Amino acid sequence: DGGITQSPKYLFRKEGQNVTLSCEQNLNHDAMYWYRQDPGQGLRLIYYSQIVNDFQKGDIAEGYSVSREKKESFPLTVTSAQKNPTAFYLCASRKTSGDYNEQFFGPGTRLTVL
Amino acid sequence: KNEVEQSPQNLTAQEGEFITINCSYSVGISALHWLQQHPGGGIVSLFMLSSGKKKHGRLIATINIQEKHSSLHITASHPRDSAVYICAVRSPRDAGGTSYGKLTFGQGTILTVHP
């Protein structure tokens, strides 16, 4: 079945460590997105990528980095520079041809920094 | 003021009741999405609409572009409908003619349906 996988579902890290969250899709979508969700707030865009080897900062990119070496994969690294990394992280993808294409979301990774 | 506002923030209902969740936005959009998030965290897209009304089973979504307002209705609500419902709007094409599909999200409405 086609879809988006994120792993792991729960992740614990010590303060000061970098951590990489995985996102893989087999939907043949060109665009991929990373969002952060905090309690009581709407999802906020961290980074997005329209095409392989290209990505753009979203609204809250500071302290994060991404790569897009393959169409299927868009890993997110939470660096030690991110001041409040504990959050729920959602990856999404979308077909870019045409205007009215939905975004499909992965199951999310809950990151807790101790 | 947030660009996307949902009301109510919390909603409790008895099984069988008709439910309405509202979404107002203040920016130009190319489409509006209604999403459902269950306690496990994964998000499912319910509707994407740019005009009029859509229906899927017991769910109905409407949008009024002139008033910048959308509603999500659930008829004959059931405890399994308990979830967070999120409204998100997609920005129009940018000046370069491309659309990266940016979504701006509301804070979500927490719906609890009791048996």
Image (cartoon, helix red, strand yellow):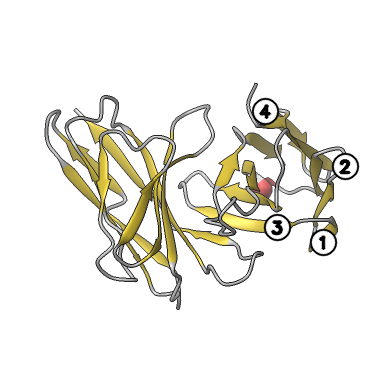
Please give the chain letter of the residue carrying mark 4: B
Marks 3 and 2: CB-CB under 8 Å? no
Q: Amino acid at mark 3?
A: Phe
Label 3 and label 4 in one chain? yes
Residue drawn at (79%, 63%), measured in percent from left and top?
B57
Label 1 Cα neighbours within 10 Å, binned few <14 / some 14-19 / many ≥20: few
Q: Considering only order in the chain, which callout, 2 or 3, is on the residue closer to the N terminus?
A: 3
Mark 3 vs mark 2, CA separation in Å:
19 Å
Q: Can you tell which of label 1 and label 2 is closer to the viewer?
A: 2
Mark 1 vs mark 2, CA separation in Å:
21 Å
Residue A109: % across, % down: 34, 47
Residue drawn at (65%, 31%), measured in percent from left and top?
B3
Q: Considering only order in the chain, which callout, 4 or 2, is on the residue closer to the N terminus?
A: 4
Vertical comparison of A37 with B56: above or below: above
Q: Is residue A57 left or right of residue B35?
A: left
Q: Which quadrant, please, contains the C terminus of chain A?
A: top left
Mark 3 vs mark 4, CA separation in Å:
21 Å
- Per the image, the residue denoted by label 3 is B47
Residue A73, quarter of the rendered image: bottom left
Label 3 Cα neighbours within 10 Å, binned few <14 / some 14-19 / many ≥20: many
Q: Can you tell which of label 3 and label 4 is closer to the viewer?
A: 3
Using the image, tell me which numbered label, if any, was put on residue B66: 2
Which structural element holds mark 2? loop
